[in-house]
Amino acid sequence: MADLAASLDRILHHLFDNFLDGYFYPFILEGLLLTIELFLLSLALSVVLGMIGAVAKLSKSRIAQANAAVYTTVIRGEPNLVTIFVIFYGGQILVNNIGDKLGLGYIDVSEFIAGTITLGVIFGSYMTETFRGAILAVPRGEIEAGYAYGMTASKVFFRITLPASIRHALPGFGNNSLVLLKDTALLSLIGLQDMLFRAQQAAGATRKPFTFYFTVAVIYLILTALSKLGLRWLNKRYSVGVRRA
Amino acid sequence: MDVAAIIDNLPLYFKGLGITLSLVSGALVCGMVLAIPIGLLASVRNPLIWALPKAYIYLFTGTPLLVQMYIIYYGTGQFEALRESFLWPVLKEAYWCALIAFALNTAAYTAEILRGAIEQTYYGEIEAARSVGMSKATIYRRIILPSAFRRALPAYGNEVIFMLHGSALAGIITIVDLFGAARIVNSRYFVPFESFITAGFFYLCVTFLIVWGFKLWEKRWHAHLRPRDTDAAQKVGKLPVSKPG
């Protein structure tokens, strides 16, 4: 009888465990949506910042050059994790100090917005370097031809330099965006409820850390593969008309 | 600014710096030992041989380092067989888990760099080696690998910096490295700006040292690519001096 009770107990435990597992998979997948949103939004922000940074680095203004140089050197010189903590925790204090002075009381900074801005700022510095190189790779003659037609400087930039530089920027852009995709996992450390954060909770509740962390790893692998496919397509599109040996 | 809290804890930061450097150098050495055979096998043009090394590279470069570290540190505890094996004294220590995760991760990136460098070997060099009767092993040892290492050097310098920055993750799993020290100072005095920026400054200094070191190394290994210093060469009589008129 005791045997029967013990085995029944074991079966119930087994069922309960699997029931819990089944509950946690959709829970993690909800985090996937957040990860993808975060990835795309911060990627867009990093492209904008990278564009501004590259233009600043190539401009004739010493002040713009110096600012861009400090931006890329500091952000690329320290770990992304440190930057994330400085911006997130430091930024929260800053926002609240400003809020106090304006009499707004306590302002809660959303992890999602803070995370998007942080990743955008970090990868903007990497994009700056990529775009700077890409713009420099555009043949000087094409730009001169634009001026010869009487285009203004901004017209030359938007009609000639920018479109022609995309092909040169794509390999670096692809690399940066793959690193950005993986770095979204770091935001689980500041409390953003992404896949990894949820996997941590699932691992704690079921005591199956391997199962859930491995699941997250597989999802990241799939995301990386999809991004690589997308990048390859972009590369093909922007290399139309380029002859290869 | 709470400068006193930082100054009082400078010894803690320096201790953390020591842990960071030991983790990074250990991971780099182990990673290189793993990367050379993996990169070599991945460059061989036989699918039976490259399949496994390429899968390894894909697995470790396609997932976040943080997830890899969690799997090794927390995930291995899920299996009773592992918990009772001789490996457990190693796998229950946060320090060794971080070291293993970093080494496996940097091995994959380094192997990928090596693979690319090996595949770019100028075929004429291999033909020349064959025509003088070198065996396959000799060709690898004397021709392919030395020139591949040279080509891989700039990218490897980048990887070393990424490893330094990635090592900040050790601070998450209770190790008191540079980042861990900053977390301790922050939690004791609640000074997020000061504590993390101090860690960032330390990382920045180490990054600059690495960049400088690799510049020297490249100068040595890429001596043949430097533009010839004609003035100096003429002075020591290595180049014929053309007399004007």
Image: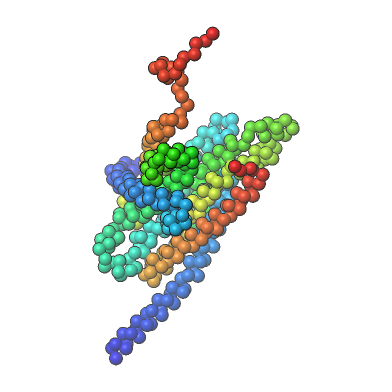
Q: Give percent across and percent down for residue A214.
A: 42, 64
Q: Give percent across and percent down for residue B92.
A: 29, 61
On the picture, is A167 further left or further right than B212?
Answer: right
In the rendered view of the protein, which quadrant contains the N terminus of chain B? top left
Q: Give percent across and percent down for residue B43.
A: 45, 50
Residue plotted at (48% across, 66% down): A28
Specify whether residue A152 is in view. no
Q: Quadrant of residue B157?
A: top left
Seen from this angle, which residue lies furthest bottom?
Answer: A1
Residue plotted at (54% across, 54% down): A228
Q: Quadrant of residue B63?
A: bottom left
**Looking at the picture, does residue A239 appear above or below residue B83?**
above
Nearer the observer, A192 or B37: B37
Q: Quadrant of residue B219?
A: top left
Seen from this angle, which residue lies furthest top?
Answer: B245
Nearer the observer, B129 or B43: B129
Nearer the observer, B40 or B30: B40
**Looking at the picture, does residue A18 appear above or below residue B233?**
below
Residue plotted at (55% across, 38% down): A133
Task: Count the numbered circles shown.
Answer: 0
Colour option used: rainbow
In the rendered view of the protein, which quadrant contains the C terminus of chain B? top right
Specify whether residue B117 is in view. yes
Q: Give percent across and percent down for residue B176.
A: 31, 51
Residue plotted at (38% across, 61% down): B71
